[in-house]
């Protein structure tokens, strides 16, 4: 509903003396465009018509984004307008309400801003047709948005890409987050994305009279007693009204989520009860697993709405807009509660509106609230991408050109100083827009001065909805999210995330401080071009040029201790498999005054020992002799046994059958006989020796043999 004074509303109801005005900003010269003002004498009677909608015809849509239109008939009898090129021009339409008997005092109400196209002409009449700024969103989505994002951020991104100013920075469910990219490589327009957002927000998307995008919803309280100012009262009809026999009462909302990544069908959830149920589906922003949450968000705004579908033609009211509430009273004094979903208004003449919905059924009625896909058939699309500042500047320029006058009230204080009020109605009491100028600041109110929500004070502090500037220099900025124009770079201060896409150079990044806070930053490795990455004290250095990692402190820990190595060289592993190559350990020490560099090398199942780089022996764990596997121990020199050590050989499976080689001699323990006995089995020699052999059975501590046994060896085998 267009805000105006009670006086103007009374004039509309009583005299209905309304006339049209159209201002046109031509697209002929960007630096100095031509401005035309067309008064009623240049417009055909009833020749300015606007069409306004918040739902597609015949249904009650959630998330509609309708392109509204206007038609302007010029009196071109003298050919005065034939030379002008109206293609791409912006027309602003006004309805003027006379507030005195002579009709000389007129209050102008802005009805909308439209981009003109397809002008046609006859010898006397030129017809101009236009569409509102919603048509600017009919451009293919660039695919460059990063996620996660809130609905508000997605809508703001669409506005910045299409050169439209967002008029509602917050709206229902505007903080709802979309965690991952839902669009993929799909071909989609920005208007479709707006519709998806508006569905989850339980809103319609609409361009208001000032050319700004709004996401709003029908008032559920407008029909309550005492809220007459929130609705229209329609009693004068030229035709109708024609209404359905039953009210529609929305009892529930069913939401069907998108399919999962593995192809699993999206779940469905119904909020509310059976009856008149609206259905939401095929919305990619409703991710798998989110149906219940989204159904609750939508249901709280829509469940319980009651209205009577119908239509009527009546004496036009220039304050009425699509989305408004109205009570129709017919000649029998029957009253019907309506929501204006589609409106056609011929300024100074009759208007027609409809309250669209599928008729209520006595049984359950599931209704798919589809996203409106009305596409304006423009002969010439405007693909030019507008810079955000330039768009805001152009919008401000258009507002200035079409600006309405204001009324002024001066308040004289006791000390003689003044407070000046500028307002939109003849008296301050009946005004809605109020500007207050005082020594303490400049303030703006949108509710008649009850509260002042915007302005700036004498200390230079400003409270604004949106700010468009070429440059911004600040000591500090406290905000929720900083984002580049194309969305590829963003800093989300509320969620402690930094998103960088396509960045190839961080000039001076390594010298910045204050980057050690909790959390992490993910940077694509192909985008790092620096020589090395290191901490402030160079305790840890990753040299990208030679691939080296140097750590002076700390440790590398993998798998919660499954593998760890610290800067002292200590390494631990629960399991280790080394394929190919060798493992080398080294140690340096002094023995008998001589320096020895000891080294052990393990490779191919062989352990080598080195002393000052001279191999001193090896242990072959994979040695093969005949058909079996045996351990081969070879010594280059002498095999020494230190005191109190021994080598034990088991002859058989019985633990008692052993031969011991100790530092004191060789001992046999065969069949329980410590001092000797018969050797059974065989001792195999590698040379295949044949002959008699004396074997010491017992030795004393001075190294002499106290007992011998003589055996015969045949080809390395003891036979007797």
Image (tube, rainbow, N blue to C red):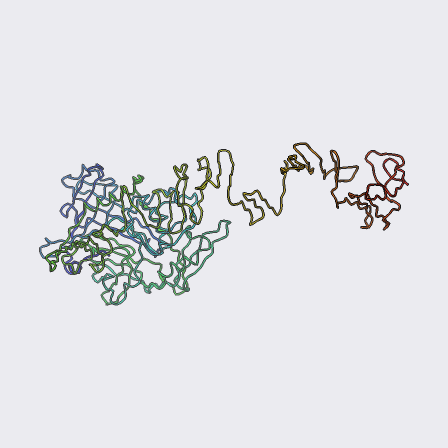
Residue 322 percent coordinates (x, y): 27, 55
Q: Is 430 situated left or right of 168 in this image?
A: left
| Nearer to us in this view, 548 or 166 | 548
Q: Is residue 381 visible?
A: no
Q: Residue furthest top?
A: 614
Which quarter of the figure is the C terminus placed in? top right
Q: Viewed as shown, does residue 667 lie left or right of 159?
A: right
Residue 489: % across, % down: 38, 43
Question: Outermost residue, right direction?
Answer: 720
Which percent across, then down, holds residue 346? 21, 52
**Number of numbered discs overlaid on the protein picture:** 0
Picture quarter containing residue 60? bottom left
* Residue 530 versus residue 433 in the image, above or below: above
Decide if residue 173 is in sight here.
yes
Q: From the image, which quarter does the N terminus lie in?
A: bottom left
Query: Along the horizontal axis of the image, is 525 left or right of 718?
Result: left
- Asked whether 349 or 648 is in front, the reply is 648
Query: Depth check: 73 or 295 in front?
Result: 295
**Left or right, 483 with reference to 37:** right
Q: Is residue 107 above or below residue 708?
A: below
The percent position of residue 110, horizontal first and vertical second, equals 20, 51
- For this orientation, the residue located farthest to the left is 102
Judging depth in this view, the residue of 342 and 448 nearest the camera is 448
């Amino acid at each position: 509903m267009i805000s105006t004074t009670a006086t103007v509303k009374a004039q509309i109801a009583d005299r209905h003396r309304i006339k049209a005005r159209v201002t046109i900003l031509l697209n002929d010269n960007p630096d100095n465009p031509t401005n035309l003002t067309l008064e009623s004498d240049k417009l055909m009677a009833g020749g300015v018509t606007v069409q306004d909608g918040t739902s597609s015809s015949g249904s009650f849509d959630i998330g509609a984004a309708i392109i509204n239109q206007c038609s302007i008939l010029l009196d071109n009898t003298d050919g005065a307008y034939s030379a002008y090129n109206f293609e791409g021009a912006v027309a602003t339409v006004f309805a003027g309400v006379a507030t005195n008997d002579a009709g000389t005092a007129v209050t102008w109400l802005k009805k909308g801003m439209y981009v003109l196209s397809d002008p046609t002409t006859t010898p006397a009449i030129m017809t101009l047709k236009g569409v509102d700024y919603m048509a600017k969103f009919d451009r293919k989505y660039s695919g460059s948005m990063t996620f996660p994002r809130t609905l508000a951020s997605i809508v703001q991104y669409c506005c910045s890409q299409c050169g439209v100013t967002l008029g509602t920075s917050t709206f229902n469910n505007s903080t709802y987050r979309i965690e991952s990219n839902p669009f993929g490589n799909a071909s989609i327009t920005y208007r479709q994305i707006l519709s998806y957002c508006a569905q989850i927000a339980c809103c319609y998307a609409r361009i208001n009279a000032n050319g700004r995008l709004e996401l709003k919803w029908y008032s559920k309280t407008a029909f309550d007693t005492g809220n007459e100012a929130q609705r229209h009262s329609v009693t004068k009809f030229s035709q109708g009204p024609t209404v359905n026999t039953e009210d529609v009462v929305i009892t529930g909302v069913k939401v069907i989520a998108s399919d999962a990544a593995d192809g699993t069908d999206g779940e469905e959830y119904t909020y509310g009860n059976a009856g008149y149920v609206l259905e939401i589906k095929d919305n990619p922003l409703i991710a798998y697993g989110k149906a219940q949450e989204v159904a609750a968000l939508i249901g709280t705004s829509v469940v319980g709405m009651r209205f009577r579908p119908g239509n009527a033609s009546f004496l036009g009211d220039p304050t009425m807009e699509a989305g408004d509430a109205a009570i129709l009273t017919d000649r029998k004094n029957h009253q019907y509660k309506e929501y204006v979903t589609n409106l056609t208004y011929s300024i100074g003449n009759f208007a027609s509106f409809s309250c669209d919905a599928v008729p209520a059924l006595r049984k359950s009625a599931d209704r798919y609230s589809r996203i409106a896909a009305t596409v304006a058939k423009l002969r010439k699309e405007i693909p030019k991408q507008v810079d955000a500042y330039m768009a805001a500047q152009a919008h401000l320029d258009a507002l200035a050109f079409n600006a309405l006058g204001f009324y002024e009230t001066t308040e004289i204080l006791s000390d003689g100083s003044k407070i000046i009020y500028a307002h939109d109605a003849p008296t301050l009491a009946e005004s809605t827009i109020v500007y207050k100028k005082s020594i303490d600041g400049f303030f703006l109110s949108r509710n008649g001065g009850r509260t002042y929500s915007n302005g700036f004070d004498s200390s230079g502090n400003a409270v604004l909805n949106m700010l468009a500037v070429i440059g911004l220099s600040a000591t500090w900025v406290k905000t929720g999210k900083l984002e580049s124009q194309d969305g590829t770079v963003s800093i989300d201060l509320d969620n402690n995330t930094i998103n960088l896409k396509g960045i190839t150079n961080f000039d001076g990044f390594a010298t910045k401080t204050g980057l050690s806070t909790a959390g992490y930053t993910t940077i694509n490795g192909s985008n790092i071009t620096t020589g090395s990455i290191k901490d402030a004290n160079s305790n840890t250095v990753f040299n990208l040029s030679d691939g080296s990692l140097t750590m002076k402190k700390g440790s590398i820990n993998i798998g919660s201790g499954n593998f760890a190595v610290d800067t002292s060289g200590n390494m631990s592993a629960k399991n280790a498999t080394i394929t190919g190559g060798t493992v080398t350990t080294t140690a340096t020490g002094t023995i008998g005054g001589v320096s020895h560099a000891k080294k052990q090398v393990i490779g191919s199942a062989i352990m080598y020992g080195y002393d000052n780089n001279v191999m001193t022996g090896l242990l072959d764990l994979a040695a093969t002799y005949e058909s079996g596997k045996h351990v081969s121990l070879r010594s280059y020199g002498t095999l020494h046994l230190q005191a109190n050590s021994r080598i034990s050989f088991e002859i058989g499976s019985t633990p008692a059958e052993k031969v011991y080689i100790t530092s004191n001699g060789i001992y046999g323990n065969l069949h329980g006989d410590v001092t000797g006995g018969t050797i059974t089995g065989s001792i195999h020699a590698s040379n295949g020796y044949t002959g008699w052999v004396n074997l010491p059975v017992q030795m004393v501590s001075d190294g002499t043999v106290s007992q011998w046994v003589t055996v015969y060896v045949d080809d390395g085998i003891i036979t007797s």
